[in-house]
Image (cartoon, grey):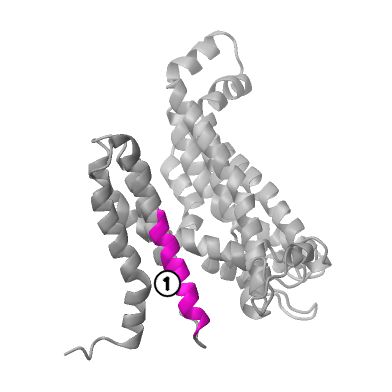
Amino acid sequence: MLDWVTPALAQAATIVGWPLVGALVVTAGVAFAPNGVRRSLRLVVWLLAAAAVVVSATVLEGGQEQPIGVWPWAFAAALGVAGVLGFLADHDDDSKPMLVFLIPAALLLTVGLVYPAVRTAILAFTDKTGTFNGVDNFVWMFTQPEALVTLANTVVWVVLVPLLSTAIGLAYAVFIDKSRGERFYKMLVFMPMAISFVGAGIIWKFMYAYRGPEQDQIGLINQMITLFGGQPQQILQNSPWNTLALIIVMIWIQTGFAMTVLSAAIKGVPVEQIEAASLDGANPWQRFSNVTLPGIRSSLVVVVTTISIATLKVFDIVRTMTAGNFNTSVVANEMYTQAFRSGEPGRGAALALVLFLLVLPIVVYNIRVLNQQKAIR
């Protein structure tokens, strides 16, 4: 009757069973404790259960040749999250019903996002064999020429793509606002957003295609160069212009997003303010800079930060068009190359950690601006 109880299942029950049952039993007993200490005791119990799972898994893994895997640590993180949510929800009666909806989502986020992030942070301080090596991976990142080129390329991407995409999208939104055929013009600019980054990379790779001087050019750019009497160029191989060629692809995609959001924001600017500025003698540029721009400031922040985050994570375009060769690699592409091509998961994790630290200030700034806008309203 117990044939279904496999050794793996028995081991899993041993690792997580007794801490979980113990936490539930103690939690039921804590319910009779004074209100002042009940919340804190319950949180401590669940955190101790999470620690017990980790300790049990570590002890059992030490006596085996095969590793247990990552699931005990993920389960321990889930126990910790459940304890924290219970601690927060027990603050008042209105918060308790939210646990029914919060706990499943929090557990999924813990297993799929928080735990991998923690494991990646730990992996960033190990070598290819999994041995702790301190900050050697970060020293490599900031001392080796190829890694420095990767970081420099990423900075160039983050500076140029958000600024140019937002500027072009804003200019386009202003010029076609309330014009005849506005919807059609918007559709033309927004269409690249419907194309995947890989698809866009393939399209532009054909645009930049190169053949020898004696052959007919199949790439549009080189065909135009030869029509004006120039020599065809290996655009995707000539550094640093190849990086700018890749950046153009990202700008081509993101301009449609910037134009759509900013066009909607412009239409939300009160007409009375623009008419009042016009009656005061303001010219079109003054109306734009003193009325329209302040009115769409929050939308500008959202657009710039969103495109900045997307640019920091850019991988598909670089991988599809150059695979990071010819000094075109960026952090996301180099992270993949080091972790899965060069057999250096520690370096890949270190690059991922740096990428996270680069994105974090942008997200924090965006949240602060949005909170300020809510306070004003």
Q: Main secondary structure of the magenta part?
A: helix
Q: Is residue 366 above or below residue 321?
A: above
The stretch of residues the image draws in magenta is 47-63
Residue under the image location 52 percent in, 68 percent down: 199
Q: Amino acid at mark 1?
A: Trp
For the residue labelled by badge 1, is the local secondary structure a helix, a strand or a loop?
helix
| Picture quarter with the N terminus | bottom left
For mark 1, does the 10 Å Cα neighbourhood hold few (<14), some (14 to 19), or many (20 or more) residues?
A: few
Judging depth in this view, the residue of 285 and 238 nearest the camera is: 238
Q: Count numbered badges in the picture.
A: 1
Q: Is residue 284 above or below residue 249?
A: above
Judging depth in this view, the residue of 238 and 347 nearest the camera is: 347
Q: Where is residue 141 drawn, in percent x and y?
A: 76, 63
Residue under the image location 55 percent in, 51 percent down: 254
Residue under the image location 50 percent in, 84 percent down: 63
Judging depth in this view, the residue of 236 and 22 nearest the camera is: 22
Q: Which residue is mark 1?
A: 71
Which quarter of the picture shows residue 154?
Answer: bottom right
Q: Where is residue 94 drawn, in percent x and y?
A: 24, 35
Q: Is residue 195 visible?
A: no
Residue under the image location 44 percent in, 40 percent down: 182
- Say left or right for 371 vs 362: left
**Magenta-colored stretch includes residue 58:** yes
Q: Where is residue 312 drawn, in percent x and y?
A: 62, 55
Q: Is residue 364 visible?
A: yes
Q: Where is residue 274 drawn, in percent x and y?
A: 50, 18
Q: Is residue 180 above or below residue 310?
A: above
Q: Residue furthest top?
A: 280
Q: Residue furthest left?
A: 1
